[in-house]
Amino acid sequence: MRVTVPASSANIGPGFDCLAVALDLLFHLDVGEPQQGATKLDANHPAAKSFADAGGEGPLFGETAIPPGKGLGFSGAARVAGLAAASIQSSGSIRYGDLLARSGQLEGHSDNVAASIYGSVTAVNQDSVVRVRCPEELDVVVWIPDGKTSTDSSRKHLPASVPFETATQALARSSVLVAAIASGDLTAMRANCVDDLHQPTRLASAPDSAHAIEAALDNGACAAWLSGSGPTVAAFVERDYAESIKRLLPSSGHSKILKVAQHGISIS
């Protein structure tokens, strides 16, 4: 069988650890026999480890366009694929609640895996997940620099607490942002896709990423954010302006125009 899982961009604006979007960069996991282009995975690959830990048996082969260490949900997609394959192998079906819980536990947070499992935009809190339809006229432009970021290392530098006012402002922004995405209010999206919880700390050591966010917004993006822990930057853009915005992002990285993956995990 082949399990296919989309990439994801998490931490959309103030939605730290809870708001993500699925992207049409795909991770393919083949069990037993590889399809053309897939290569054998070693035992340390996150898909192979999650597959084995869930009781899966047999050789695994993978093929993906998701770059690892870039903040586009590579490990989350791989773990979802491995767990789903093991579940199908043992029971013939996927128990989505269990898949979300187990993959989120392996990742340490559930935002990336929720988007990869369900597709579109997802808001998640522990075992509660809501899928939000993204406005159809929006694509996602991603700017990807050469460097990589370790999520675990990056998290160690985040503050242990924030002022009460900062926390309440983040709650307000995230609430309005989700409502704006659901209703297609692009002006409210832009005004509320702002973060004070993790981005200032992470962007302080990634000035090119900070410049990419500014460039996207200055040239008409509806929203822009540090994708996951970075260094990639992602932006919601109206489709007609995607190409022009892509060309105006910093030359210190390369840019792609991606579609929102409307569907999550699939099996063939």
Image: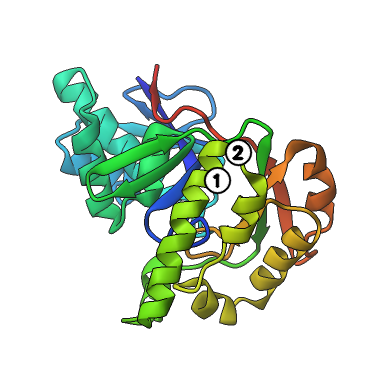
Q: To which residue does mark 2 refer? A: 184
Q: Is residue 217 visible?
A: yes
Q: Is residue 18 above or below residue 139?
A: below
Q: Quadrant of residue 114?
A: top left
Residue sitting at x 25%, y 31%:
96
Query: Where is residue 169 shown, x and y percent of the image?
Result: 45, 69
| Helix, strand or loop status at disc 1 | helix
Q: Is residue 4 above or below residue 46?
A: above
Inspect the image, locate mark 2, and give the three-letter code of the amino acid beneath it. Answer: Gly
Q: How is the image coloured?
A: rainbow
| Helix, strand or loop status at disc 2 | loop
Residue sitting at x 77%, y 43%:
242
Residue sitting at x 67%, y 39%:
139
Q: Is residue 24 visible?
A: no
Inspect the image, locate mark 1, and give the three-letter code of the amino acid beneath it. Answer: Ala
User: Is 167 on the left or on the right of 92, as rendered?
Assistant: right
User: Is 250 on the left or on the right of 231, as rendered?
Assistant: right
Estimate how packed mark 2 is, as few (under 14), some (14 to 19) or many (20 or more) residues with alpha carbons within 10 Å: some
Question: Which part of the image, by quadrant, shows the N terminus?
Answer: top left
Query: Where is residue 162 shown, x and y percent of the image?
Result: 37, 81
The answer to whether mark 2 and mark 1 are in CB contact below 8 A is: yes
Viewer-nearest residue: 2 or 84: 84
Viewer-nearest residue: 207 or 64: 207
The residues bearing labels 2 and 1 have C-alpha atoms spaced at a distance of 6 Å
Question: Which part of the image, by quadrant, shows the C terminus?
Answer: top left
Query: Where is residue 124 shown, x and y percent of the image?
Result: 33, 47
Q: To which residue does mark 1 refer? A: 180
